[in-house]
Image (cartoon, coloured by chain):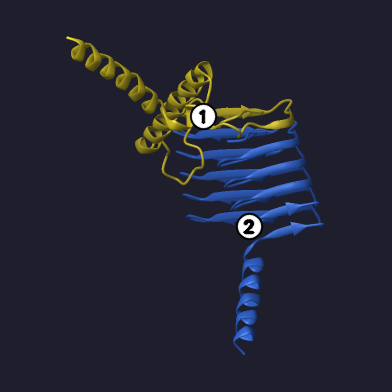
Chain colours: A yellow, B blue
Amino acid sequence: MKTLILKCLAIAVLAVAGRQAFAGEETLDIDTRFRAKIAKEKIKMEALERRAQSANGNGSGNGNGAAAPSCGSQSIGNIETDGRIGAAPREVFVFAPNAINLVTASGCK
Amino acid sequence: MKSIKFAVIAALTLSAVSAMAGEVVNSAVTATAVGNTSAGLASTALQNIGVAEQSGHIGTSTVLVNGAFNTSAGLASSATQNIGHASGNGRIDNTFVTGNGLVNTAAGLAATAKQQVGFADNNGRVRNAFISAAGATNTAAGLASSATQEIGGAANNGVLQNAAVIASGSFNTSGGLASSATQRIGVAR
């Protein structure tokens, strides 16, 4: 009976340790709440990567060598980092009065 | 003898590398009322003013353009206008890029118009820069045409830092069935 209890305890300890290993060695020395945040960010980044890959795979461009496949989009002072950290604009002043981006009625179809 | 050979090889390698990397440094580039036109099937109009390519670097420089017109017309034609543009690990730093009255037009089936002002491509870095484009107009007209206008920004792992981007009255338009227009001002992506 005692051996069985000891075995159960050993399995429980191993299971907990295993979970720690799954979380990633690089995050072991980080506080639990930060580790959760990092994991959340990682998931978000992976989702964004998948979305970007599927968008490229669909070939949503019009095949004429255009740089941007998105139709009728206007970005002013935006950050498109695709989930990457540290690529955000810093100390940037953007001023664009009367900036107009226009696609006629028949466009985007 | 061997050491001389090594020195020669090293010198040649270094000179080749420096020749590959485009640089506009400690310079002033000024253009006034310049025009570029191309017409016909698959015609291409490319207008580059103050451009550094292949590990391009524009540093401590002024690029000043007043009135630049770039036009292409015809089936699958493309018009590309680059003002103060660095490509291929492009870097723009300590630089002043000003464009007034920039007009880029592509007309025809599947025409493409691309206008870039103060823009760094491919691991682009824009730092300590002042970029101004007043009344920049980019137009693509025709079935499946596409217009892209990018003012003051960095693309592909781009970094935009310590910069002022002013784009007053910038106008980007595409007309025609299945056409698209993309306008980016002060964007890092």
Q: Nearer the viewer, residue B97 or B102?
A: B97
Q: Quadrant of the N terminus of chain B?
A: bottom right
Is residue B21 visible in the rendered image? The answer is yes
Disc 1 residue type (three-letter): Gly
Q: Residue furthest top?
A: A1
In the image, what residue occupies the spot 69% across and 42% down? Answer: B126
Image depth: mark 1 or mark 2 in front: 1
Look at the numbered discs 1 and 2 and tell me whether their residues touch, using CB distance below 8 Å: no
Question: Does residue B145 appear to the left or right of B171 in the view shown?
Answer: left
Q: Nearer the viewer, residue B8 or B109?
A: B8
Is residue B117 visible in the rendered image? The answer is no
Question: Does residue B158 appear to the left or right of A25 in the view shown?
Answer: right
Q: Chain of mark 1?
A: A
Coordinates of residue B158 in the picture (x, y in percent): 60, 40
Coordinates of residue A14 in the picture (x, y in percent): 30, 22
Q: CA distance from mark 1 to mark 2?
A: 28 Å
Q: Which residue is mark 1?
A: A83
Q: Nearer the viewer, residue A3 or A40?
A: A3
Coordinates of residue A45 in the picture (x, y in percent): 46, 28
Count the marks: how many? 2
Q: Which residue is mark 2?
A: B53
In the image, what residue occupies the spot 47% across and 49% down? Answer: B76
Secondary structure under the numbered disc 1 in the rendered image: loop
Q: Residues within 10 Å of mark 2 (few under 14, many from 20)?
A: many
Q: Residue furthest front?
A: A2
* Vertical position of residue A100 compared to residue B87: above or below: above
Q: Chain of mark 2?
A: B
* Vertical position of residue B35 compared to residue B127: above or below: below
In the image, what residue occupies the spot 49% across and 21% down? Answer: A35
Coordinates of residue B9 in the picture (x, y in percent): 60, 79
Q: Nearer the viewer, residue A26 or B30?
A: A26
